[in-house]
Amino acid sequence: MTTLDLSALGLRVSEILRNAPAPVLYEHAIRFEPGTRISADGALVAYSGAKTGRSPGDKRVVRHPESEADVWWGSVNRSMDAHSFAINRERAIDYLNTRDRLYVVDGFAGWHPQHRLKIRVLCSRPYHALFMRTMLIRPSAAELAVFGEPDFTLINAGAFPANRLSEGMSSKTSIALSFEEKQMVILGSEYAGEMKKGVFTLMNYLMPKQGLLSMHCSATADHTGRHSSVLFGLSGTGKTTLSADPKRHLIGDDEHVWGDDGIFNIEGGCYAKTIDLTPEAEPEIYRALHFGAVLENVVLNEDGLEVDFHDTSITQNTRGAYPIEFIQNARIPCVAGHPTDLIFLTCDAFGVLPPVSKLTTAQAMYHFISGYTAKVAGTEEGVTEPSTTFSACFGAPFLVWHPGKYAELLAEKLREHRVNVWLVNTGWTGGSYGVGTRVPLAHTRAILDAIHGGVLAHAPTELDPIFGVAAVSHVPRVPEQLLVPARAWSDGAAYHATASKLAAAFTANFKQFEAGVSDEVRAAGPR
């Protein structure tokens, strides 16, 4: 823990702990954060207060002449003026100056030595420091000795509210980024995931400027590391679960960049949903939640301080953060060669998308920009039937450029490296939620095994009459009656009506992007 002068930022905290090791952060969390516990397996159990998830409606980006033309302004990137950002920053600094101690974490974003960024995190909660120490790439002692000034500074004063009357504010929560100031300021939210996604948003801006594709995805590689596979998917589709594959090396579970010489992970850790986590279904993740990991908003059994992963009384969004090396088959450093396969995961609760289908490049761009999955009935108040969710590039809240920019970069790389693209439905088959059955995880794993083994590249397919994709009709270890939706449903008329309804939702959602894509991509959607 070396000394650090932060007076240039206006910080005058008497005790600064820079790059404190995990045991020290554990000790401080237990001593200074009421309610913080240690689980029976040794993970730090912390609570984020009123906010147990991200607040995308409170994200702001400073509108500046240097970056204004690059930003996809709208509901994802709402603008803020430089003066309001300065007010928020001063408010955050003033709050941190009232704290007894300040935690500083220095780390890297990006495993590629030529493209990594130096990130500095300033916060007042040891739980936040441990979280970011976990999620950033941890420098060696030699690298820390010459770390110098950061490329980007994240100022987390989330326990203190924003002034909702300030220009551009919508609530007492503010997640504000300035690309020109190279800073992010958090007020009014103690949810740790805001920090992680702030760094990702920065990478989503800077990497495309270099011709590199930043991706919200998990990634694995074969045992040589020369051939990788990329999995896209929104929350609940199985992106993290399926990337924890003991037959392959894990590159990362959430954020990557596809460059000129392959792919690399942005992060040094994983951040997995833990709701209903079991050692049988997800053994790698379950075993990773020991000393050095952070469990967020979970409930402990008071008898033995064991985690009840089925208890959602605090939130359904319970999470576990752990260093990637806690996964036995993680590939360190987290880099690999170009992908042979790209997989779009969707949890189709309507049960009309095939369990696996092969996409053309134009279809890949269409489905990438669409970013579809579905919510099932009962997960939110008032939801009585499956509902569609579309998130551009499978990560709209973190995009900076227009989705078409990322899609064009994707298409260039697919063509250059002749990548197979697959749409994999981890949701329902034989009927919608409540009628059909969810595709068993074992069958989805068999599909991925067949993809990675090269089996599906030459497997028979049938053209889906509504979505136009090539549905794979034979996969080893998967019942064939499940693979073609029209045959999996017992009620043909109900299938056609439901599929047509989902197809119409795709078409309506895509209208907002039509002006920025080619005729070929526009024609690649449902028929």
Image (cartoon, rainbow, N blue to C red):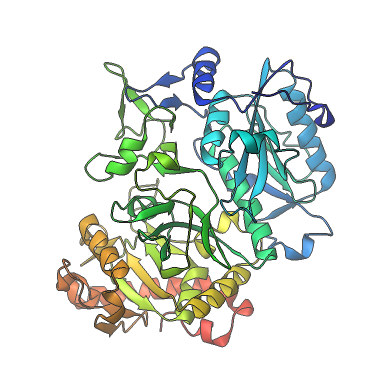
Report if residue 296 is visible in the image.
Answer: no
The vertical placement of 241 against 50, above or below, is: below
Q: Quadrant of residue 518?
A: bottom right
- Horizontally, residue 104 falls left or right of residue 327, namely right
Q: Quadrant of residue 351?
A: bottom left
Single out the residue that lies furthest toward the top.
31
Q: Nearer the viewer, residue 10 or 88?
A: 10
- Horizontally, residue 93 falls left or right of residue 243, namely right
Query: Which residue sits at x=34%, y=23%?
Result: 300
The vertical placement of 478 against 123, above or below, is: below
- Horizontally, residue 399 falls left or right of residue 524, namely right
- Horizontally, residue 231 falls left or right of residue 413, namely left
The vertical placement of 109 against 336, above or below, is: above
Q: Quadrant of residue 396?
A: bottom right
Query: Which residue sits at x=42%, y=38%?
Result: 319
Q: Position of residue 409 (x, y in %)?
A: 59, 72
How many numbered dots are placed on residues in this image? 0
Image quadrant holding the N terminus, namely top right
Q: Position of residue 77 (x, y in %)?
A: 67, 55
Q: Nearer the viewer, residue 439 or 6?
A: 6
Q: Position of residue 517 (x, y in %)?
A: 59, 79
Q: Nearer the viewer, residue 335 or 63?
A: 335
Single out the residue that lies furthest toward the front.
142
Report if residue 5 is visible in the image.
Answer: yes
Image quadrant holding the C terminus, namely bottom left
Q: Nearer the viewer, residue 466 or 135?
A: 135
The vertical placement of 96 against 403, above or below, is: above
Q: Position of residue 477 (x, y in %)?
A: 16, 66
Query: Which residue sits at x=16%, y=73%?
Result: 480
